[in-house]
């Protein structure tokens, strides 16, 4: 079985049972609800305890349970630019604001990147009388570039210099 096949199996069971992602997240628990959903979609791995809970919930085999605990091959968007309108809006945000985010982050922190590994994300519904809003909050550790081969007096990392 390929990981994509397991994802399809989980989606089929979710659909057949009429479950919501919230139900699945509550049953598995122990980590971020977003990570649980991403793992079910094949983009993250579940810790062993959560993989066991998922296997019990979905009625999976021991091999399928182990697969949920394996590091996946990440990157599920089949084409670029993405054609799904919701996913395209995130792509559009990066196209429009990506250089601005880069400049502002590097001005504040220095020469580096925001981690998507040491990372937190939450999503919530924000009521609004003009139409509810999607509120995403992301927080990633700043990772400075290392200036290897640096000589005496040259910083080792690209943190912002005072």
Image (cartoon, helix red, strand yellow):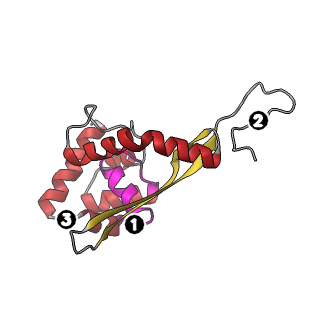
Task: For mark 1, give the secondary structure.
Answer: loop
SS for tag 3?
Answer: loop
Residue 33 on the magenta span = yes
> Which residue matches tag 3?
19
Labels 3, 2: front one? 2
Q: Residue furthest top?
A: 149
Which label's residue is closer to the chain start, 3 or 1?
3
Q: CA distance from mark 3 to mark 2?
A: 51 Å
User: To which residue does mark 1 refer?
Assistant: 29
Classed neighbour count for the residue bearing mark 3: other residues with Cα under 10 Å, few (<14), some (14–19), many (≥20): few
Q: Which quadrant of the figure contains the N terminus?
A: top left
Q: Bounds of the magenta span?
A: 28-48
Residue bearing the label numbered 2: 156
Element on which disc 2 rests: loop
Q: Earlier in the sequence, mark 3 or mark 2?
A: 3
Q: Residue at x 31, y 61 (%)?
A: 56
């Amino acid at each position: 079985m390929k990981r994509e096949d397991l994802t399809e199996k989980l989606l089929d069971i979710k659909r057949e049972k009429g479950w919501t992602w919230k139900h699945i997240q509550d049953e598995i628990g122990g980590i971020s609800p977003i990570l649980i959903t991403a793992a079910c979609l094949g983009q993250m791995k579940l810790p062993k305890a959560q993989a066991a809970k998922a296997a019990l919930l979905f009625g999976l085999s021991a091999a399928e349970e182990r697969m949920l605990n394996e590091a996946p091959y990440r990157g599920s968007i089949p084409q670029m630019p993405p054609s799904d309108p919701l996913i395209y809006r995130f792509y559009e945000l990066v196209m429009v604001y990506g250089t601005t985010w880069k400049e502002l982050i590097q001005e504040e922190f220095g020469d580096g990147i925001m981690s998507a590994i040491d990372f937190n994300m939450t999503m919530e519904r924000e009521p609004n009388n003009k139409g509810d809003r999607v509120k995403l909050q992301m927080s990633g550790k700043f990772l400075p570039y290392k200036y290897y081969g640096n000589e005496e007096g040259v910083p080792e990392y690209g943190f912002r210099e005072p």
